[in-house]
């Protein structure tokens, strides 16, 4: 157990490192305290900037500094691993309403888009039992790779340099997946293909069952079944679909 005096000194030093407040810290040399502040701040900022290079590029220097300063000063980090700490910036930015304050409505989507790559890349390797490939992709229950994640976004941040993203609010879907080599890839989905993956990855539905729920009044059902099978074959080729 720490003595109360020692614990108080630690808290005061932590407050100084986080907020740069001029606090009385017994035994500390004031002229050296800024080194601790600089070290802690730099470690946190570097970790966040490494995780979110795109977000950094769309924020002005002043906006970026404000976000980092406030995060360091106010946020109580929950992740014990430094590389995972930047994930907490997403909820922090939501709570601070930075999209509205900075007039960057797609900021949260950019953060989520970038974090998904880290999340998928850093997933723990799993031992996947050998799975027999099925021939009837329309009616079989299928197995998906554990190294994939679906994103539902409000802005097309994957086209950030091509269109006016801020004025293109809508429904956008992405599949983020890890190749066998470890490379993380993104696949743009339609609302229908996103729905199909959600239904099939639950393990309780087949492609035919899933499609029947949304195309019952369509005249070209046979063609849509064929397109659905082709989509699954593409996912299989990419390593997303295992069976």
Image (cartoon, rainbow, N blue to C red):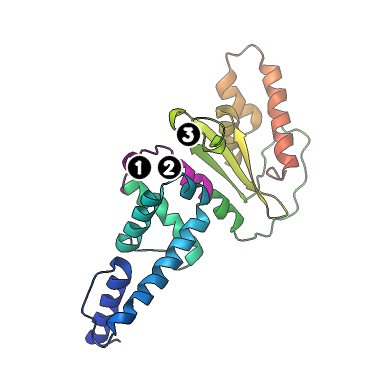
The numbered mark, 2 or 3, whose residue comes first in the sequence reads 2
Give how far apart the Cα atoms at labels 2 and 3 are: 9 Å
| Residue at (71% x, 18% y) in the render | 223
Percent x, y of residue 110: 48, 43
The numbered mark, 3 or 1, whose residue comes first in the sequence reads 1
Reading the image, the residue beneath label 1 is 102
Reading the image, the residue beneath label 2 is 107
- In which quadrant is the C terminus drawn? top right
Residue 59 visible in the snapshot: yes
| Residue at (45% x, 58% y) in the render | 86
Total count of labels: 3
- Badge 1 marks a residue whose secondary structure is loop
Foreground tag (1 vs 2): 1
Residue 218 within the magenta-colored segment of the rendering: no
Q: Give the range drawn in magenta.
A: 96-115
Q: Check residue 115 in the rendering and tell me which mark sits there, or answer none.
A: none
Q: Magenta-highlighted stretch: main secondary structure?
A: helix
- In which quadrant is the N terminus drawn? bottom left
Percent x, y of residue 119: 55, 54
Give how far apart the Cα atoms at labels 1 and 2 are: 9 Å
- Badge 2 marks a residue whose secondary structure is helix
Report if the CB atoms under discs 1 and 2 are less than 8 Å apart: yes
- Badge 3 marks a residue whose secondary structure is loop
Residue toward you, 37 or 2: 37
Reading the image, the residue beneath label 3 is 155
| Residue at (28% x, 68% y) in the render | 20
Mark 2 Cα shell of 10 Å, populated few (<14), some (14-19), many (≥20): many
The numbered mark, 1 or 2, whose residue comes first in the sequence reads 1
Q: In this view, does 154 lie above or below 48?
A: above
Residue 100 within the magenta-colored segment of the rendering: yes
Residue toward you, 7 or 233: 7
């Amino acid at each position: 157990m720490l003595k109360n005096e020692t614990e108080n000194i630690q808290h005061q030093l932590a407050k100084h490192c986080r907020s740069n407040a001029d606090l009385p810290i017994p035994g500390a040399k004031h002229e050296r305290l800024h080194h601790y502040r600089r070290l802690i701040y730099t470690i946190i900022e570097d970790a966040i900037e490494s995780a979110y290079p795109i977000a950094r590029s769309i924020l002005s220097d002043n906006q970026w500094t404000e976000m980092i300063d406030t995060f360091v000063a106010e946020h109580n980090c929950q992740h014990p691993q430094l590389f995972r700490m930047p994930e907490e910036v997403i909820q922090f930015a939501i709570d601070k309403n930075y999209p509205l304050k900075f007039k960057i409505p797609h900021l949260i989507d950019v953060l989520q888009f970038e974090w998904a790559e880290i999340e998928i890349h850093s997933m723990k390797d799993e031992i996947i039992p050998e799975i027999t490939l099925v021939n009837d992709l329309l009616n079989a229950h299928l197995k998906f790779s554990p190294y994939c994640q679906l994103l539902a976004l409000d802005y097309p941040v994957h086209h950030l340099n091509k269109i006016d993203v801020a004025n293109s609010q809508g429904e956008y879907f992405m599949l983020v997946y890890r190749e066998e080599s470890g490379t993380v890839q993104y696949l743009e989905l339609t609302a229908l293909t996103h729905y199909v993956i959600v239904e099939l990855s639950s393990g309780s539905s087949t492609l035919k069952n899933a499609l029947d729920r949304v195309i019952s009044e369509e005249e070209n059902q046979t063609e849509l079944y064929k397109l659905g099978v082709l989509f699954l074959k593409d996912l299989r080729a990419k390593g997303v679909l295992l069976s």
